[in-house]
Image: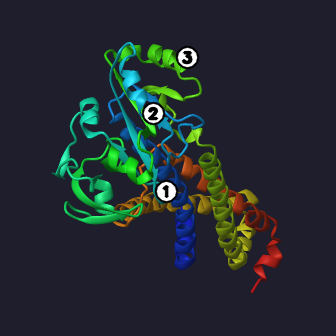
Amino acid sequence: MLNKLILANLSHRPVRTILSVLAIAVEVTMILTLVGVSHGTLDSTAERARGVGADIIIRPPGTSVMSSLSSAPISQKYIAWLMQQPHIALATGTVVQGLSGFDSITGVDFPAFERMSGQFDFVSGNVPVDDNDMIVDEYYARQHKLQVGSHINLINHDWKISGIFSGGKLARIMVKLPVLQQVMDRVGYVTVLYAKLDDPKQAEAVAKDLKNELKGYPIYTMDELTSLYSISNVGMLKDFIYVVIAVAVIVGFIVVFMAMYTAVLERTREIGTIKAVGGSAGLVLSILLRETLLLAVLGTVVGILLTYGTQFLMHVLPSNLTQETVYSWWPIAGMIAVVGALLGAIVPGYKAVQQDVTEALSYE
């Protein structure tokens, strides 16, 4: 009976109910989209790193895992030096030039790279042959409407798409290493060094030896590197997520506060009637809190569904971001929505409980 009353109350003002649910849904979508993009971007970065096939990665001095790379400070002579070290079977280097947003263009020694990682899985086309040839992954090609034979201007240089490959291999955009070195005016230098071992189990020992030889160079095993691609290691991103969660709670609080406060004013006579026939203050409060909880649950469900809409938009619109569905955050986002909604119901609930029966029955 009480549940029927709650449903009747919500359906009596359908516009207000729908707007309340949508507002709560937006806060849930905000949280899940941000978390999904964060996980998606970091996981795709880790996947591309693993796709290199290397066991040891050497980055420029003064950089960290999360540092953006857009220079070439390491002498290319280190590649030959690495090949002379114990347990190192293959070595190569790449040059990275940053572009706008999260994109970058990577110069690759394709023969050496394919010996290390295996051949590219091309959807169409092949590796660069001419100096102006470029290959891109499916994601970048789809976002920028590129196909084999298309031309694109990046870093003030005209490139021709010679191949489109399946993602998960080092970078989204690749060209010949010597060509990018010339464009960047860094001939003889690379940005990152990669080494493949004859026995991957020796990765930690080899990395330790290399750190003793190359003082000041950040040197990682592949397992160590990919484990660092997490939200907890990106301080600003983690703080930003907390800010979005705080904003979401505030939005939920305001929306529910306005909806429930208006509902209490409109149902003053109804509340007075419930109290007049013996209904306790606890019963009145229970009705309001159940209505609030139902709005929060409905808003959470709609918000989760809306995240699939944001995924679709990122898939079809030009974007450098990847959004994952992070199922573990569904209950977290739901609890955040519920807490914000219940906080917003406190003041209206208190007002309803404190209403005088006589005044409520005479309310017009």
Is the residue 110 above or below the residue 11 in the image? above
Q: Quadrant of residue 345?
A: bottom right
Type of amino acid under label 1: Thr
Image coordinates of residue 80 in percent, x first then y, are 37, 25
Q: Which residue is drawn at 41% across and 22% down?
A: 81
Percent from the top left, x then y, of residue 251? 65, 64
Side of 205 where 232 appears, left or right? right
- Residue 25 in view of the camera: yes
| Cα–Cα gap, marks 2 and 3 | 22 Å
The circle drawn on residue 226 is 2
Residue 33 numbered mark, or none: 1
Q: Mark 3 points at which residue?
A: 212
Mark 1, secondary structure of its residue: helix
Q: Which residue is drawn at 76% across and 79% down?
A: 361
| Left or right: where 355 falls relative to 10 | right
Q: Can you tell which of label 1 and label 3 is closer to the viewer?
A: 3
In which quadrant of the rendered image does the C terminus lie? bottom right
Q: In which quarter of the image is the N terminus?
A: bottom right
Q: How far apart are marks 2 and 1 (CA)?
A: 23 Å
Depth check: give the residue in front, 325 or 260: 325
The one nearer the camera, 222 or 20, is 222
Residue type (three-letter) at the residue carrying disc 3: Asn
Residue type at mark 2 is: Thr
Residue placed most toward the observer, 123 or 119: 119
- Distance from label 1 to label 3 (Cα)? 43 Å
Q: Quick one: which residue is furthest to the bottom in this view?
A: 364
